[in-house]
Amino acid sequence: MKVVILCGGYGTRIRDVADDIPKPMIPVGGLPILWHVMKYYAHWGQSDFVLCLGYKGQAIKDFFLNYEAHTRDFTLHLSAARSIEYHSAHSEADWQVTLADTGVDAMTGARVKRVQKYVADQDNFMLTYGDGVGDVDLKKLMQFHKSHGKILTVTGVRPPGRFGELMSDDNGVVTEFNEKPQATAGRISGGFFVCRKELFHYLDDREDLVFEQEPMRRLVADRQMMVYEHDGFWQPMDTYRDYMLLNRLAEEKRAPWIVW
């Protein structure tokens, strides 16, 4: 099943981090958050990607065109032949990555429509964002999607709490502190969509078509959208605090999404 990843929006600029790169290229543990998203899907056997590029998309193209140099140790022999000797290895040899320019100013609905030709042979495909991670069970997600037969499955997550959560005993002694716990009530869309090909009947090429607005409202009206409930970890990178949290989790080897 192909995985379409939205990588083209201007997004929220993160101070001192994302001035000259698109948000999916912001590093977590030394590699772009987009790479983490792709590694997570590949862990579940989904390694055929279609990247919807837009704002500063050339940075994403350059990363994959020079993937070996970005991910492996190497020795460069500065002779006339300029040969390169790679020393380390990576496990992404089975990845297929289609990099599609979908327009600098296009909104999410238009971007998905513009890659239709790259998923035309698929009855179902996956869709997500290039700037958020989670520990969603993708096998169960796909099974759920195929079981109900509707056009779109959205993963409903509990958003991270804005403030730290304290737990204490009867004497007021703090027994647990969670910096950004998941909320205990209410859900939002966390991406991690699974789509039937009929989704494209709800999309068109208008630059201002926002997938999360008109198309999803029409799907709801037609009773063609189902929610897969995920109560585990989910975290977007929208602020500098998010950036610091994700990097700290990776550094301390406590990142729930790093399962490879």
Image (cartoon, helix red, strand yellow):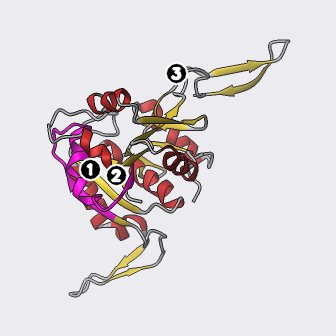
Do the numbered discs 1 and 2 sit on residues whose CB atoms are within 8 Å?
yes
Q: Please say whether residue 98 is one of the residues in the magenta stretch.
A: yes
Residue 213 visible in the displayed image: yes
Quarter holding the N terminus? bottom left
Indicate the amino acid at tag 1.
Cys
* Marks 3 and 2, the one that precedes in the sequence: 2
Name the mark nearer the viewer: 3 or 1.
1
The residue labelled by disc 1 is 52
- The three-letter amino acid code for the residue at tag 2 is Val
What residue occupies the far right of the structure in this picture? 171
Q: Residue at x 28, y 33 (%)?
A: 215
Which range is magenta? 97-126
Q: Earlier in the sequence, mark 1 or mark 2?
A: 2
- Disc 3 marks a residue whose amino acid type is Arg
- Cα–Cα span, label 3 and label 2: 29 Å
- Name the N-terminal-most of marks 3 and 1: 1
Height in image: 35 above or below 183? below
CA neighbours of label 3 inside 10 A, class few (<14), some (14 to 19), many (20+): few
As drawn, the label of residue 4 is: 2
Which quarter of the rendered picture does the C terminus lie within?
bottom right
